[in-house]
Amino acid sequence: YGVFLTPFEHLDYMLTYHSTLTFSENDEVYLPLSWTNPLFQFPRRGYYVVAVSVDHLKTYHPIAYYGLQTPLWWMAWVVFAFSLYLAVLKLRRGELPKLELFLLCWFSANYLIYFPMAYLLHRWVYPFYFYMTVPIIAIGLPKIMEGDKISELVLYGVTAMQIGWFLGFFPVKAQWFIDLLLLLGVPA
């Protein structure tokens, strides 16, 4: 294509371009800690929401695409902390913590990397960057919760919350499901 004569020119262009993607103090930015914190989370954002009003009495959304967290996201730090703890225990026993090391590396490369970028370099970051971390949470959570009866109950609770979250925020809802949600007094 002849755009860049050498790979170094291309790297220079990428570095220059990415250096311009910074935010200032007045910009609305959802920093990485707000992606996994249920207490101080980023607000739900509607990307495409269709509102239907019936007799001006009830309003519902048969189609609603939102950007939001899920209960699985909130378990990120639990998985990270327990993976670190289990890795240390295995190392002390002289074992190689393969799965724990995999979890920690994936978590670091796909989530923790955004902390210095956002907080130190003021680089724009977006909550959808966290999507690459979700599979590792889904793998790590059952691993750290195995064996103990209380842990299994917590895992079942998180799974039930996640299923409920999925059903409640699924973008396209059937009319019978909307009617059920409205009957229960839950936003539809």
Image (spheres, rainbow, N blue to C red):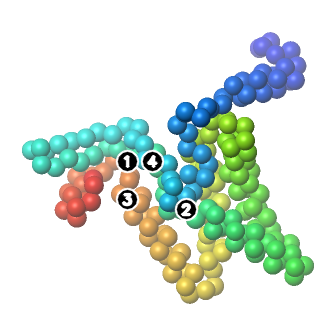
Amino acid tagged 3: Leu
86 or 118, which is in the foreground? 118
The kind of residue on which mark 1 rests is: Pro
Please tell me the numbered disc located at residue 171: 1
Q: Residues within 10 Å of mark 1 (few under 14, many from 20)?
A: some
Tag in front: 4 or 3:
4
Instruction: Report the amino acid beneath label 2.
Output: Trp
Label 3 residue SS = helix
Badge nearest the viewer, 2 or 1: 2
Mark 2 vs mark 3, foreground winner is 2
Residue at image coords 72%, 37%: 121
Tags 2 and 1 in contact by the CB under 8 Å rule? Answer: no
Q: Amino acid at mark 4?
A: Pro
For this orientation, the residue located farthest to the bottom is: 149
C-alpha distance separating marks 2 and 4: 14 Å
Residue named by callout 4: 43
Q: Residues within 10 Å of mark 2 (few under 14, many from 20)?
A: some
Residue at the spot 21% in from the left edge and 58% down from the top edge: 182
Which mark is first along the chain, 1 or 2? 2
Q: Secondary structure at mark 1?
A: loop
Residue farthest along the left direction in this orientation: 55
* Mark 2 or mark 4, whichever is nearer to me: 4
Sequence-first tag of 4 and 1: 4
